[in-house]
Amino acid sequence: MTIMFNNNPPETHRGVATGPRVRITALDAGYPGIPVLRQLTCDIPALTMTALVGPNGSGKSTLLGVLAGVIRGTAGEVRFAEGRPPAFVPQRGAVGDALPLTARQTVEMGRWGERGLWRRQTREDRAVVDSAMERLAVADLAGRQLGELSGGQRQRVLIAQGLAQESDLLLLDEPTTGLDPASRERIATLLTGLVADGTTVVQATHDLETARTAGTCLLLGDGRLVEQGAPARVLTPEALSRTWQPG
């Protein structure tokens, strides 16, 4: 697989981005002996929310892993427009409850890519962490253990860790799964605000109502692209039935 980072920003028209933040062509990816994505070709538009939708096993998490650089594709091309490396927020379940980390230490991990694991934090690092925690309204949780937090609190801490990476491309894997309606709405509002401030957000989701509020959707089924475009065009009863009940 080829990964390319362009020197040029996405195309714009009257100050509004019109080109893709990421262009994916004929991507194959998976795990040893388990192919998941098959000849996937799609675009991730810049400066909008993209929802990855599909049943379990459709390839949503695998695609996020490829974009984040933690899974290597076996064929195809991923081309990134100009910008910082993506920030990846995994599912809450992927972060162990037993880890002896406070909420602040968890957010500080977002600075490791900038300063390395062993270098001491700078004043700038501390300011970035403070800002991210304030943006996600978790500053008052700074000294609490991650495993002690509620689901919504923990998810906001993990998103703050993503913000601390100061990327303009934020990848989230099921950020609202298992949360109560109030927590889901709060996170949805936060993500909408990030897009308005210039961040391209990509989130995998099972929640069709969340997907319908996105700027664009990628509907995946059995590792292939079923449809892409505006939610009203993609999330039709016919397409959803075909995806969740293949064949």
Image: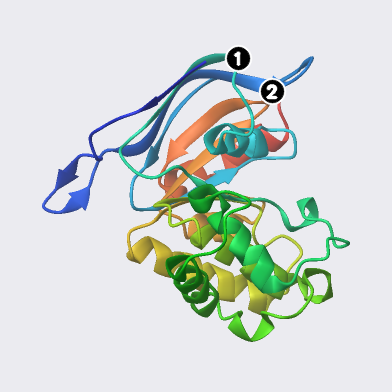
Image quarter where the C terminus lies is top right
Task: Work out whether residue 17 or residue 167 is closer to the camera in this orientation and state it.
Answer: 167
Name the quadrant containing residue 175: bottom right
Measure the alpha-carbon separation of dots 1 and 2: 8 Å
Residue 1 appears left or right of 71: left
Name the quadrant containing residue 157: bottom right
- Report helix, strand or loop for mark 1: loop
* Vertical comparison of 170 with 178: above or below: above
State the residue lying farthest toward the right. 98
Say what amino acid the circle numbered 1 marks.
Thr
Residue 29 appears left or right of 113: right
The mark that comes first in sequence, 1 or 2, is: 2
- Rendering coords of residue 27 (x, y %): 53, 20
* Vertical comparison of 188 with 166: above or below: below
Task: Work out whether residue 72 or residue 176 is closer to the camera in this orientation and state it.
Answer: 72
Count residues near mark 1 (Cα–Cα under 10 Å), then give few for <14, some for 14-19, many for 20+.
some
Count residues near mark 2 (Cα–Cα under 10 Å), then give few for <14, some for 14-19, many for 20+.
many
Say what amino acid the circle numbered 2 marks.
Gly
* Vertical comparison of 149 with 42: above or below: below
| Res. 134 visible in picture | yes
State the residue at coordinates (44%, 29%). 42
Q: Which residue corresponds to mark 1?
A: 74
State the residue lying farthest toward the bottom. 140
- Rendering coords of residue 113 (x, y %): 53, 48
Residue 198 appears left or right of 159: left
State the residue at coordinates (57%, 76%). 186
Can you tell which mark lies on residue 20? none
State the residue at coordinates (60%, 55%). 208
Q: Which residue corresponds to mark 2?
A: 30
Q: Are marks 1 and 2 in contact (CB under 8 Å)?
A: yes
| Res. 36 visible in picture | no
- Rendering coords of residue 40 (x, y %): 52, 22
